[in-house]
Image: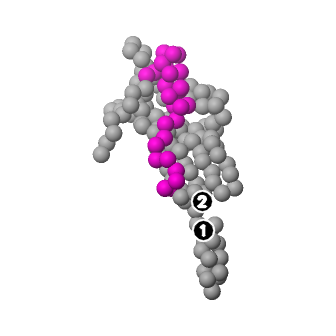
Amino acid sequence: MTKLKTLLFLSLALVAGCTNVTSDAARSVYPVTGSSLNTEALFSAASDFFGERSYRCDREREGGILRCYRKLRDLYIHQTRAEVMVLPDDEVHAHTLYANRWDEGLIPGELISKEYTNPDVLAFCEHLKAQALGECRLQPESG
């Protein structure tokens, strides 16, 4: 009977997975002084930049969000992907840049780091500044 319970537990563990999402600090993207930054120019720059780094970028029709992602790890028991989202500005807020790491599989969340910084986002912010397209600023944490 003990072997049956052990086998049942292991079978359930294989079927049930864990999903963990960890976020980088959100950033606002502002135009450099004396210029304007429109959504199309920012989305084009982001698609090109992240595309060169093996991300796949898609623009959502509703909401106008640019979403770029790439696989970081693709093992039989665990997958990890990085996701970068660029949200368009509105009349009150600047463009917003979010980065997340998605971990899905059989590795429990307790064994996965809760801290995440996407170096590609940092490089993109430097790229925007070097091209005089925009400037990234960390958003204050809410809560």
The residue nearer to you, when weighing 95 against 14, is 14
Q: In this view, does 134 lie above or below 110?
A: above
The residue nearer to you, when weighing 24 against 127, is 24
Give the position of the C terminus as an image quadrant.
top left
- Which residue in the structure is indicated by mark 1? 13
On residue 100, the disc is none
Q: Find residue 78 and report its image quarter.
A: bottom right
Residue 27 location (% of width, % of height) = 42, 32
Cα separation, mark 2 vs mark 1, equals 8 Å
Residue 63 in view: no
Q: Is mark 1 on a helix, strand or loop?
A: helix
N-terminal-most mark, 2 or 1: 1
* Residue 9 drawn in magenta: no
What's the amino acid at mark 2? Leu
* Residue 120 drawn in magenta: yes
| Span shown in magenta | 109-135
What's the amino acid at mark 1? Ala
The residue nearer to you, when weighing 89 against 72, is 72
Judged from this view, the residue extending furthest toward the front is 2
What scheme was used to colour the molecule? one colour
Give the position of the N terminus as an image quadrant.
bottom right
Residue drawn at point x = 40 percent, y = 24 percent: 30
Residue drawn at point x = 63 percent, y = 71 percent: 10
The residue nearer to you, when weighing 108 against 84, is 108
On residue 106, the disc is 2
Q: Do the residues labelled 2 and 1 touch (CB within 8 Å)?
A: yes
Residue 138 location (% of width, % of height) = 38, 31
Residue 40 location (% of width, % of height) = 52, 28
Q: Is residue 29 above or below residue 36?
A: below
Q: What element carries label 2?
A: loop
Residue drawn at point x = 60 percent, y = 59 percent: 106
